[in-house]
Amino acid sequence: MGRLSFVGALAALSAVLCIAVLCGEVARGAAVLPAGFVQSRLATELDRPTAMALAPDGRLFVAQQGGQLRVIRDGRLLRRPVLAVRVDDSGERGLLGVALDPGFSRNHWVYIYYTTANPPVHNRIVRFTLQGDRASPGSGRLILRLDNLSDARNHNGGALHFGGDGRLYVAVGDNADGENAQSLQNLKGKVLRINRDGLIPRDNPFYQRTSGKARAIWALGLRNPFSFAVRPGTGTLFINDVGQNSWEEINRGRAGANYGWPRFEGPESSPRFTPPIFAYRHGRTASTGCAITGGAFYAPQRVEFPAGYVGDYFFADYCGGWIRRYDPASDRALPFASGISAPVDLLVGRGGALYYLERGTGSVYRVRYAGGQRTSHPW
C-alpha cells in the first residue's frame, strides 16, 4: 500500500482511520481564503468525487469513483448522471478521470478513464457522445485499453487532459510496483500521449524503440501521477507525482523525460533523470501534507484574480487540506487556502474563477476575487 491509499481513503472506514493516523483529523467544510477572495458552493452530495472538467458552455462535469459522471448546470447538480459504467471501485480503482474534447462544442465528445469490473481487471479510456446532458445510447467507443492490473488496488493515476497540440495526455500509476515505472514494456508509471481516436502519434519519443501500445509512452519514471495540468496558450504541462516516504513532486512535462521513480524521490542530481521543478516534504500536520492532488494554471481568458497570480500554478494536498500557488518565475510556493476536506482536483475557468473539488464533503466550490471585475458567465 505504501504511504497512503489516498484516492480510496474515504471509501471505507479503515481508510478514514488511516488518514486520521497519518495526517491528523481531516478538516471539515469550506476553505479559509486570503482577504478579498470569496467562495460559493456549487454542489454537494457527490459520492466519492475524483475529477472534474469544465465545458465551454459552463457545465461542470464531475466523475464519481463508483462509475457515475455527474453534471452541474446553472449552479445545480442534476439528478440523473450523464453516464454510468460498471467499475471495480475497490481501493484507488474506479472512475478516475474525465476530459472534454477540444471540439466539444461541435462534437460533444467526453472521455473517461476507469477500472473495469470484469476480469481481467484493467484501466481503460472510453469516449462517449453527449446529447444534451446525457450520453447517447451506444455511443461508447474504446479509445485505449491499458495493461491488466495486479492484485494491488492502488496507484492507478487516472488524469486526462488535452495538450496544446490537440493530443490526449494520460497519467498512469505504477500499480504499486515501482519497477513498472522504468520499463518500456508496459504503460504503468507513465504519461501517455495518444490521438483523440486512440491511434498513437508517430512522433512520440519512444515510438521507434517500442511496439504496440508501448509506443504511447511519452514520459516515464512516475509513481502515482494522480493529477496534472496543461497551461492554456503555451501547452506547458506540470505533473503532480504522489510520493512514498519523503517528498511530493511537481514535474515539468517533457517528451522522453524519466523522472526517476523508484530510483529517486524528490530532488535528485543524477544526469540520467529529470528532477522535479518543485518538491515538498511529507509530514503529519496540516501545514506539510502527504499527497499532492489537483493542479491548475492561472492563465484564464479573463483575469479576475490580482495580477500577481497570473501564470502561477495552483496545487493541493489531500491530507493537509490546503491549496498553494507555485510561482515558476521565483521558484516559490505561497499559501492560498486551508481547511479543505480532502481536495482532489482543481481547475480555472475561462472567466478567471478557481474551482476545487472537496472529496471529504462531496462538494464543488468556486473561488472568485471580490475586488476583480465581475463577469456574467458562470465559468
Image (tube, rainbow, N blue to C red):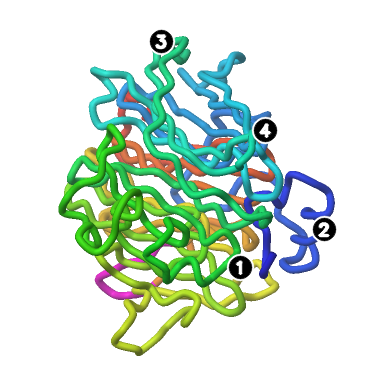
- In the image, taking residue 188 as reference, residue 205 lies left or right, namely left
Query: Which residue is under mark 1?
Result: 289
- Reading the chain from its start, which is encountered first: label 3 or label 1? 3
Q: CA distance from mark 4 to mark 2?
A: 19 Å
- In the image, taking residue 78 as reference, residue 21 lies left or right, namely right
Select label 1 or label 2 by which is in front.
2
Which stretch did the figure color magenta? 325-332
Q: How far across and how far down the image is residue 40, in percent?
A: 53, 34
Query: Which residue is under mark 4?
Result: 47
Q: CA distance from mark 1 to mark 2?
A: 16 Å
Q: How far across and how far down the image is residue 260, in percent?
A: 41, 77
Query: Which residue is under mark 3?
Result: 132
Which quarter shows the N terminus? bottom right
Q: Quadrant of residue 352?
A: top left
- In the image, taking residue 98 as reference, residue 109 lies left or right, namely left
Indicate the amino acid at tag 2: Leu
Which SS class for mark 2?
Answer: helix
Q: How far across and how far down the image is residue 147, in percent?
A: 49, 49
- Reading the chain from its start, which is encountered first: label 4 or label 1? 4
Indicate the amino acid at tag 4: Asp
- Reading the chain from its start, which is encountered first: label 3 or label 2? 2
- Reading the chain from its start, which is encountered first: label 4 or label 3? 4
Which quarter shows the C terminus? top left
Nearer to me, 311 or 221? 221
Nearer to me, 346 or 265? 265
Q: Which mark is residue 16?
A: none
Query: Which residue is under mark 2?
Result: 17
Q: Residue at x 50, y 66 (%)?
A: 223
Q: Is residue 259 above or below residue 349?
A: below
Instruction: Specify few, some or many for label 3: CA neighbours under 10 Å numbering under 14, 14-19, or 20 or more.
Output: few
